[in-house]
Image: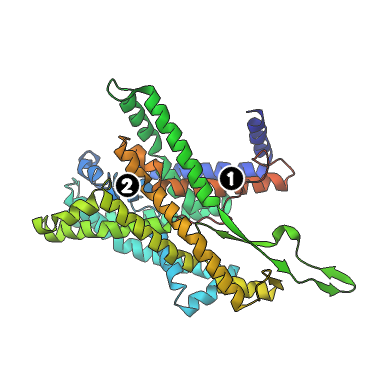
Amino acid sequence: MKRFIETIQNIWKIEELRNRILMTLALLAIFRVGSNVVLPGIDHTSLVDLQNQASDGLLGILNAFTGGAFANASVLALGIMPYISASIVIQLLGMAVPAIQKMQKEGESGRRKLNQITRGLTIAITAAQAPGYIANLMAQNVQITMGSGQFWFSAWITLLAGTIFAMWLGEKITDKGVGNGISLLIMIGIIASLPQAFLQEAASKLAPQGGGLVLFILELAALFIVILFAIALTLAVRRIPVQYAKRTTGGRVYGKPAARQYIPLKVNASGVMPIIFAQAIMFIPVTVLTYAASGSENMSWVINIFGNIEGFWYNFLFAVLIILFTYFYTAIQVNTNQIAEDLKRNGGFVPGIKPGMATAEYLDNVLSKITLPGSILLAFVAILPAFAMIASVNTAFAYFYGGTSLLIIVGVVLDTLQQIEGYLLNRHYDGLMKSGRVKGRSTVNAF
């Protein structure tokens, strides 16, 4: 505890870091306030049906990512999700569109161009999604206090402005605060539901027929173990040794420092994207059949399978999709040919492997081997909430036992702590850890 207090004091002594932390907290507070501001023209007392609809499934995930703004018919109801969708589209286009590939290799200038394209695409996606959200509001019998046409136009403009404002907040946090702003906005939305879920679980377990204090403590211990497992999965890497050919210039021998003579290949290089893709795929059959088949008995078994998140077949298909998408997204994220080319250009090589294509093939082989256990472990983490629900854990609290929510929280916290530790070490203070350093991801995407 003494060391923790000293670390907090050291953080507070660094003026730049102190100002960045305060700026981050202020912008996050603004985002949370905006998540509770209802769209103009809506009677907030008629949102019960909408809140029930957004209690589970993909809508429940969207509601969690927006911190409840989706179910509250807030001005930030669509939140930062259109920006995430736009970023994913740009990443996928980078595989096939030469112009985007060129911008990705242009450094800072290319990054600025891609940011502008992503912002424009975000606006287009929001403009397309907002009418669907408004139509859903009307279908849930939400009461409005103005004319239908006037409400549609004002709500569409407000939702568009809300997403732009959320995007602006995220970028300001990245520039003026600590951590990745977009990721922090998602994390704060997820964590916003944790206190209520925790209190509900505590009340249910401490009730006369709830199981008692011992069972509740066991649940917290299990959650702690799951968090440690998620951290280990996030940080796990396979180090590939690298040597650099030394060169002689002016009678001096130059070479790369020994501390950097390895390539860290992450066991889970795809992050949470496979889970997000798999959840979207799993939700499509239920949505289509619910609105198209109108509950036809011939197709009711499909709804039972894809709508029961505690069922065996749902979780089996979910896990298989995650494994497949992990391989797909890892292939997008990790370009072994580019790594091999960069090594060759800088005079580096893997011992026993020829530079160039042979190195790329070796790296690809290693990546394929470590991706298999990584994908299986990721699938296991993704279906853990189902096991928690089967063990009678409250649904809202069970979501924190794994899945997208836990992995996002772990990744964002590690990245933020890494940045804070960087400020401490640069000012010659002790780091956050008693020994070693925080080895979070150098860059953390919320998607």
Quarter where residue 97 is shown: bottom left
Q: Position of residue 259 (x, y in %)?
A: 72, 57
Q: Amino acid at mark 2?
A: Ser
**Kind of residue at disc 1:** Leu
User: From the viewer's perspective, is the residue at label 2 or at label 1 nearer?
Assistant: 1
Assign the C terminus to one quadrant of the image. bottom left
Residue identifier under label 1 = 417
Q: Which quadrant of the view contains residue 164?
A: bottom left
Dot 2 alpha-carbon crowd within 10 angstroms: few under 14, some 14 to 19, many 20 or more:
many
Image quadrant containing the N terminus: top right
Q: Position of residue 338 (x, y in %)?
A: 58, 73
Q: Nearer the viewer, residue 195 or 115?
A: 195
Please report contact status of discs 2 and 1: CB closer than 8 Å, yes or no. no
Left or right: 438, with 269 as reference point: right
Return the residue at label 2: 74
In the rendered image of this protein, does residue 47 appear above or below residue 62? Answer: above
Tell me the residue at 33%/35% (across/down).
393
* Numbered-mark total: 2
User: Which of disc 1 and disc 2 is earlier in sequence?
Assistant: 2
**What is the CA distance from the residue labelled 2 to the residue labelled 1?**
31 Å
Q: Name above or below for residue 385 compared with residue 371.
A: above
Q: Which mark is residue 356?
A: none
Measured as percent of width and height from the top left, residue 110 is found at 55, 71
Determine the residue positioned at 32% across, 55% down: 318
Q: Is residue 48 left or right of residue 225?
A: left
Per the image, label 1 sits on a secondary structure element best described as helix
> Residue at horizontal 36%, vertical 33%?
196
Furthest residue to the left?
297
Compare residues 166 and 248 and report the one nearer the observer. Answer: 248
Closer to the camera in the image, 43 or 255: 255
